[in-house]
Image (cartoon, helix red, strand yellow):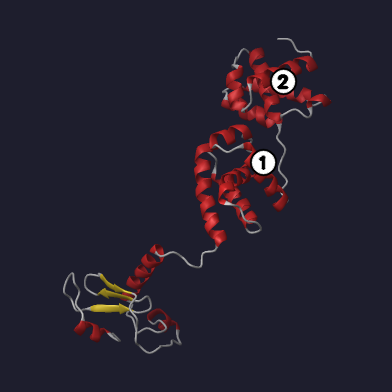
Amino acid sequence: MSNHSNLSTSRKCPACSSTDLILLDDIGVLVCGKCGLVIEENVLSCDYERRFFSQSDKLLLRRTTTPCSTPLLSVRQYLVGIKSHHEKNPLESTHEKKLKYCASFLSDYCNKLLLPDSVKHETLRIISQYLAKRNVSMKDLPAFIAAAMFIALRNNGNYKPLNRMLKLLGIPKKSFSKMYRLLKETLNIQVQLPNPEKYVLVFGNELRMSNDCIRVALNIIKRLKTYKETVGKDAASLAAAALYYASLVTGEKRSQKRIAQIAATTETTIRNRFKEICNILSLKI
């Protein structure tokens, strides 16, 4: 099967009985020139090698192929695309495979947490940098992706409570802490510390509180900063307690249970922080 005439005399298309058969020997495919049916794949060419020396030859010729008319170029490209789509790429590295797997995991997590694309892109950048230096086992991938996503959230100013995030994703905190520590040490990443004021704004909006109520809570946080004994307190629970106090003062009452759900903490923690705030600032309801 060295040329088109040999094919015409020896073979026929099983669909339309046409003898107009075309051998695309650079990809080893025999097709019908009339109906486009792929008759045979992995066909070996017996033609002599050909070389091209001009730009026009590059468009019409291939090395080890016979001349090809311009209309057949689109057919050739289409078949190459189908073949490459269905065949596994042997040159794909382990790093690329794992990165694709992480991307599918990450898309699912972002949909669950309703995160913007900017966080997703930043998370993928962190994941790619880490995988270029160290490997991650398949069992640790969920916690690894969650840790990278948490870092991206914090550094983008998005303050989602960690406990609530892990609960929604179903990831143990111990596994998360391990991967979070490895990410920070390997990439030398500085993660922004949680800010009580940011938590007040986030929780207040989710609780649908008025600007006046949120302003009262922010004023409480501002006054607490002058007292050393409150510096080490958890930022999320501190913001939750301040919002609970503000809701009582302004009359926009929210239950401790509801605030605890938003802040991903417990009602007992909110009550304890509320009592501490009242004692330190000598507040009365």
Residue drawn at point x = 34 percent, y = 69 percent: 79
Q: Which image quarter is the C terminus in? A: top right
Report the front residue among 228 and 206: 228
Residue drawn at point x = 70 percent, y = 52 percent: 186
Residue drawn at point x = 63 percent, y = 16 percent: 247
Classify 219 as above or below 73: above
Q: Name the residue under label 2.
A: 273
Q: Mark 1 points at which residue?
A: 177
* In the displayed structure image, the side of residue 109 where residue 136 appears, left or right: right
Instruction: Tell me where residue 279 appears, x and y as whole percent.
Output: 78, 15
Classify 48 as above or below 177: below
Q: Residues within 10 Å of mark 2 (few under 14, many from 20)?
A: many
Q: Say whether marks 1 and 2 touch (CB < 8 Å).
A: no
- The kind of secondary structure element at disc 1 is helix
Residue drawn at point x = 59 percent, y = 32 percent: 164
Amino acid type of the residue that numbered disc 2 sits on in the rendered structure = Arg
Quadrant of res 93: bottom right
Q: Can residue 233 be seen in this view?
A: yes
Quadrant of res 58: bottom left
- The kind of secondary structure element at disc 2 is helix
Instruction: Tell me where residue 284 appears, x and y as whole percent.
Output: 74, 10
* In the displayed structure image, the side of residue 143 where residue 13 appears, left or right: left
Report the front residue among 283 and 30: 30
Report the front residue among 194 and 166: 166
Question: Of discs 1 and 2, which sits in the foreground?
Answer: 1
Classify 31 as above or below 274: below
First in residue order: circle 1 vs circle 2: 1
Amino acid type of the residue that numbered disc 1 sits on in the rendered structure = Ser
* In the displayed structure image, the side of residue 201 where residue 110 appears, left or right: left
* In the displayed structure image, the side of residue 36 where residue 190 appears, left or right: right
